[in-house]
Image (tube, grey):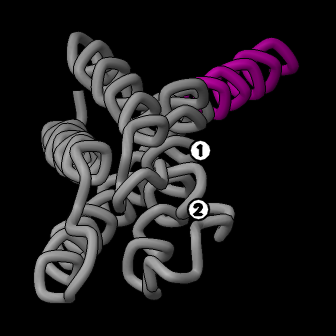
């Protein structure tokens, strides 16, 4: 009788351990080869920040707000720079390191908003007098769009 109780307790403990492993595995995502795409897009985004965004001002100047006041940068490019750093760089790197499914969705949605904001920033610079959008802003917008599409594919396929 005691042996049956011991077997039942061991089976229950084994079932609990298997359930815990299953729950842990469901939260982890392996981006596979798409991690290379994310890494290249991250590199392109970093390069985009050192290239000119508006006139001679690069993305880091726009992000810090140290551009010439005469250029009238506006809110949208600054917002895009902040979103690109927060979601495109910081959250994407964190997602690659931790590989949690919730972070994949946060990166996908954040980069999706960043891509929209990037296109809006480029448009806003084309409709004002003065310096238009530079190559750095375009590179950054394309990089954030690529990050968004890649994270959405990872989130949906859940490899």
Q: Is residue 43 left or right of residue 63?
A: left
Q: Is residue 85 left or right of residue 144?
A: right
How many numbered markers are drawn?
Answer: 2
Residue for badge 2: 63
Q: Is residue 67 left or right of residue 52?
A: right
Classify residue 119 by image quadrant: bottom left
Per the rendered image, the range of residues in magenta is 1-18
Residue 23: horizontal and vertical position, in percent? 52, 39
> Is residue 43 shown in magenta?
no
Residue 68: horizontal and vertical position, in percent? 58, 71
Residue 158: horizontal and vertical position, in percent? 23, 36
> Is residue 17 shown in magenta?
yes
Q: Residues within 10 Å of mark 1 (few under 14, many from 20)?
A: some
Identify the residue at horizontal 23%, vertical 21% (top origin).
Answer: 37
Identify the residue at horizontal 79%, vertical 26% (top origin).
Answer: 5
Do tag 2 and tag 1 residues touch (Cβ < 8 Å)?
Answer: no
Residue for badge 1: 90
Q: Evaluate whether residue 14 shows in this view.
A: yes
Q: Quadrant of the N terminus?
A: top right
Residue 47: horizontal and vertical position, in percent? 40, 29
Q: Toward the viewer: 36 or 128?
A: 128
Classify residue 129 by image quadrant: bottom left
């Amino acid at each position: 009788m005691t042996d049956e109780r011991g077997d039942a307790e061991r089976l229950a403990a084994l079932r609990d351990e298997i359930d815990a492993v299953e729950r842990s595995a469901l939260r982890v995502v392996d981006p596979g080869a798409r991690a290379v795409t994310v890494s290249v897009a991250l590199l392109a985004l970093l390069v985009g920040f050192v290239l000119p965004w508006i006139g001679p001002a690069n993305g880091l100047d726009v992000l810090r707000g140290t551009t010439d006041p005469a250029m009238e940068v506006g809110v949208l490019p600054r917002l895009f720079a902040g979103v690109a750093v927060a979601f495109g760089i910081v959250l994407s790197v964190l997602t690659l390191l931790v590989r949690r499914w919730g972070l994949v969705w946060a990166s996908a949605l954040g980069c999706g908003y960043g891509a929209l904001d990037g296109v809006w920033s480029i448009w806003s610079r084309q409709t004002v007098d003065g310096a238009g959008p530079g190559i750095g802003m375009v590179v950054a917008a394309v990089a954030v769009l690529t990050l968004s599409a890649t994270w959405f594919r990872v989130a949906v396929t859940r490899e």
